[in-house]
Amino acid sequence: MTTVHAPRRRRPGFGKVLRLPGVYAPQADSHFLAEAMLREHVAGLDVLDLCSGSGVLAARAARLGAQATAVDISHRAVLTARLNALLTRQQVAVHRGDLLGAVPGRTFDLIVSNPPYVPAPPVALPSHGSARAWDAGPDGRALLDRICDAAAPALRPGGTLLLVHSTVSGPEASVRRLREAGLRAGVSDRAYVPLGPVMRKRQTWLRERGLLSPGEDKEELVIIRAEKR
């Protein structure tokens, strides 16, 4: 059954965050995912922060007693995550690579991921620059589908995936793919947030595609929670 939670008034802060140019800054989706991660009681768990960006979720997991690993494909994000681990005096293993290919053969108790999920006009996915942190193809699912398909083998028995994205990117598709992979999956959390700068710039295009309603100035974020039996 889907459980709907109202967003908390006080979000878990990340403190001072260093960020190189082009690296995704922690925003509403980052805080939303951090709230969900806190409920998983991560102490003692082997946690992977996939598409880590600045590394704040991995550092938070380490501070809570987890063995934390962070993965991102961006050189600048990897360096940023390492710097933030040093800044917070947390031990985080940071790897550069393409999703789970960066940690071949590894399995985890918990995977958290805030991947690129913003629908973008049908051009090639960016290979560099800040847009790489959010552009995800015409339906926003270029990374989401790959994560859903690859998650089950990377989870230990009883392990959990927490995946955050916007409803404009089709949460029902995420749930379906995860279930088809043998995981018990559903939407565990929902929150409405003001449209961010990227979504605001694309309002006309998103409305033309039926992804935003006329006059809509907020988007709904969801946490997909999937558990391996």
Image (tube, rainbow, N blue to C red):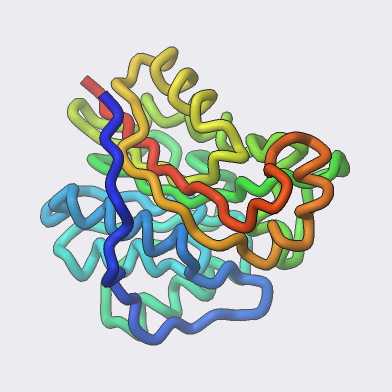
Residue 143, placed above or below residue 64: above
Residue at 54% in and 24% down: 173
Taking depth in this image into account, of 145 and 30 the one nearest to the observer is 30
Residue 26, how many percent across, how many down?
A: 48, 69
Q: Position of residue 106 (x, y in %)?
A: 35, 38
Of the pair 35 and 85, the residue shown nearer to us: 35
* Residue 45 position (above or below residue 12): above
> In the picture, which quadrant includes the C terminus?
top left
Question: Residue visible at 87% across and 43% down?
Answer: 123
Residue at (12%, 53%) from the top-left corner? 44
- Image height of 27 relative to 13, above or below: above
| Quadrant for the N terminus in the image | top left
In the current view of this chain or complex, which residue is farthest to the right? Answer: 123
- Where is residue 71? Give x, y as percent: 47, 54
Residue at 42% across / 16% down in the picture?
181
- Describe residue 199's horizontal placement relative to residue 193 as left or right: right
Left or right side of 50 for 207: right
Q: Is residue 197 left or right of residue 25?
A: right
Q: Position of residue 7 (x, y in %)?
A: 32, 57
Q: How many marks?
A: 0
Q: Which residue, as the protein is rendered here, is positioned at the far front?
A: 215
Front-most of residues 211 and 124: 211
Q: Quadrant of residue 64?
A: bottom left
